[in-house]
Every structure is written in structure tokens, then in C-alpha cells.
Image (spheres, rainbow, N blue to C red):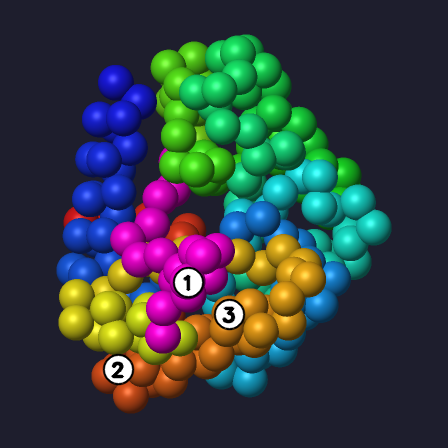
Amino acid sequence: MPWIYGQLARILLERRAIEHEALVLTFDDGPGSSLTPAILNILAESKAKATFFLLGRNIAGREAIVRQIAEQGHDICSHGYDHLHSLKVSPFRAMSDIKRGWAAIDAALGTMRKKYPFRPPNGKLNIISLLYLLVRQVPVVYWSIDSGDTWRRQPDSLRVAQLAEKAGGAVSLAHDFDRKNENTSQYVVETVRAALAMAADKGMQVLTVSELLDLGG
């Protein structure tokens, strides 16, 4: 059931992005001390908004960056706390990790929302976690294009721009955690710049996940 749900959710999200000719830039595993601010600067230059799926364990010491993301009007969502593969841990540990991730975001923002849209680490959910999210009415968000920034051999930094243009819309996945390899960080920066330039050239709207989900269709 979780696998089927994930496949359907991914397809429906992609169709909605294409229907509305939208580019949705999403970033997982942050915040990073240097890469996240660099991405925020690029987005500010382009007057564009993006969505950040924060990893709870990376928030400590970077609360100011989390607040900066929120203050600049970007979507803040959750990627859990410890990036657990929900099929490799007990179902209830996975569910607890989701809650802990939400709590870390609330602590950084000084809020009490208690739930945020969720992207499953590795795109995997177990039945307990899925049912918990459905009962809480939490959007489970996947993606349609992987930038390839975590692949052993990274593709061309134009990958997201080219595939999104070809499809007519996309929800892209990249990662903004701190890297030991500066070349990888630069690859992410180049990917973002190229995607935003394509969207501007083709008249494609750049939306957050929340904006996309709020649209009809």
C-alpha cells in the first residue's frame, strides 16, 4: 500500500506541475551553513520562492538560517529528524522520527504548528507512518525530477532545466546540506541558476509546494 500510494502521489504531483506550467524547486536534508544561504541569495535575486524539506538533526546551530528561510517567504517542510529509511527501522520509530522532525522546526521558529508537509527519506514509507500522516492530513510530497547532485556521477547541471522544459513543468529535487566537496555545492548552485533562467525564458511560473497544492486540478 505505501508503495502504491507513493507512485500515485508522485504521478499526480507531476501532472499538477505540468498542468499549471510550474517549476517547483525543492531542497532536502538542509539547512546547510553555506549552501542554503547561497541558494537563498540566488532565489532572492530572481524573486523566486522554493521549498525546503529540513532535516531535524541539521537544524541545531542553524536556527537563524531556518528563520531566514521563513522570513523570505519560502516553504518550510520536513524530511524527518534522522533521515531514517522507514522500511529498515520499526514502524513506530519511523513515526516518532516524523514527530521529532516537526518539533525541531517548531523549536527553531518558535512556533507550535506541530506538523509540516513531509517528504519521506529515500521516498519510502511504512504502513504505520503512512496511516499516521493521512490521519493527520499531512501532505506527503515526492518529486518528478532528481537533479542528480547525490549521484556518484553527476549529470550535466542543465538536467533539471532541460527536463522541466521538455515536460512543461516539474517538481525538482536537490540537496542543500553542507558538502565536503565544493564542486558538488557548485553543481547545486549551477542547477538552480539554470532552472530559474529556463523558467524565466519560457514564462514558466516558479511556485512553492504549498502554492502548487493550493491550485486546482
Dot label at residue 203: 2
The type of residue carrying mark 1 is Arg
The stretch drawn in magenta includes residue 27: no
Stretch of the chain drawn in magenta = 139-156
In the figure, is residue 3 to the left or right of 206?
A: left
The percent coordinates of residue 153 (x first, y second) are: 41, 62
Cα separation between marks 2 and 1? 31 Å
Question: As rendered, which of 216 and 196 lies closer to the eye?
Answer: 196
Residue 49, compared with residue 82, is above or below; it is: below
Question: As rendered, which of 81 and 209 lies closer to the eye?
Answer: 81
Question: Closer to the N terminus: mark 2 or mark 1?
Answer: 1
The type of residue carrying mark 3 is Val
Number of marks drawn: 3
The percent coordinates of residue 7 (x first, y second) are: 23, 35
**Would residue 160 be visible to someone looking at this image?**
yes
Image point (17%, 52%), residue name: 15
In the figure, is residue 79 to the left or right of 177?
A: left
Residue beneath disc 3: 188
Residue beneath disc 1: 153
Crowding near the residue tagged with mark 2, few <14, some 14–19, many ≥20 C-alpha atoms within 10 Å: few
Crowding near the residue tagged with mark 1, few <14, some 14–19, many ≥20 C-alpha atoms within 10 Å: few
Residue 18, compared with residue 210, is above or below; it is: below
